[in-house]
Structures are given as structure tokens and as C-alpha cells.
Amino acid sequence: EMDHIKMAVSKIEAHHPNVLLVEKSVSSYAQEYLLAKEISLVLNVKRPLLDRIARCTGAQIVPSVDKIFSPRLGQCEVFRLERVVEECRSNDSTNKKSVKTLMFFEGCPRRLGCT
């Protein structure tokens, strides 16, 4: 299994991505290998959001590492994460804090349907 994971990460690395977005999860071993290769990994991205990011960056969504042949990588000038804390007041005057992490893809090529 470890050899398969290393081979899969090598296939990904061969295309020189900076960021990899996946719809589900990735094994902890693969996460470690990707980190060692300095490839940022975003897990559990919903398919509609993946579709939108792909459309705006010009990326091709690949259903599996086994299907990577000549993928079209997306482009943006800056990728950044920002944590936002929201305070919610309830009826009983208690404050609850919600933390959300937002992804920003800035400087994407101009494409139809992207805002």
C-alpha cells in the first residue's frame, strides 16, 4: 500500500502543482508525502465548488490519480486562506463563536461564468 501511495504522489508531483483540492479525504501517508513535496492539500471540497474553481482557474477535474495522463492545471496568481470568526447571539444571551476558513484564488485568467 505504501508503494502505491508513493507512486500516486509521484504522479501528482510530476505535474508540479502548488495546491491540490480533493472532493473526499486522502490517506495520512499521502498527506505527509504531499507536505514533504510542498504541495498544499485541501480536503473535503464539495463537487459544485470544485467545478466552480476549475471553471475559474481553467483546471481539469481528474476523477482519480489513476486517470492522470496530461491534466490541465488551473492558474491563479495568489492562493490564500483566511480564517473568519463569527459571533452568534442566541435568545438566552449566550455568545457562540463559529470559525470558518475561506479560500481565495486571486488573479485567475478571465473566463466566462466566473465572478
Image (cartoon, rainbow, N blue to C red):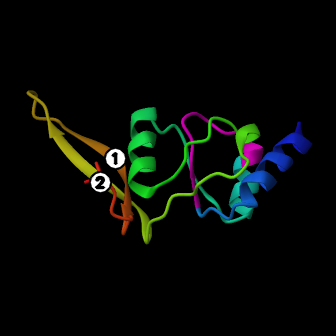
Determine whether 79 is above or below 113 in the image.
below
**Residue 22 relative to residue 108: left or right:** right
**Residue most extreme to the top:** 91
Q: Residue 28: say if magenta.
A: yes
Which residue is disc 2 drawn over? 84
**What residue appears at the point 8 percent right and 27 percent down from the top-left corner?**
91
Residue topped by disc 1? 100
- Would residue 91 be found to the left or right of residue 83 on screen? left
Stretch in magenta: 19-30
Q: Is residue 7 left or right of residue 98?
A: right
Q: Where 33 falls versus 90 (above or below)?
A: below
Residue 104 x, y percent position in the rendering: 37, 59
Seen from the viewer's position, the closer of residues 85 and 109 is: 109
State if disc 2 and disc 1 touch (CB < 8 Å).
Answer: yes
Q: Position of residue 61 (x, y in %)?
A: 55, 43
Assign the C terminus to one quadrant of the image: bottom left
- Name the image quarter holding the N terminus: top right
Dot 1 falls on a residue whose secondary structure is strand
Q: Amino acid at mark 1?
A: Lys
Describe the element under mark 2 as helix, strand or loop: strand
Give me the residue at 28% from left, 48% from top. Answer: 113
Q: Nearer the viewer, residue 17 or 103?
A: 17
Q: Residue at x 63, y 62 (%)?
A: 17
* Quarter residue 38 falls in: bottom right
Magenta stretch contains residue 32:
no
How far separated are the C-alphas under marks 1 and 2?
5 Å
Along the polypeptide, which appears first: circle 1 or circle 2?
A: 2
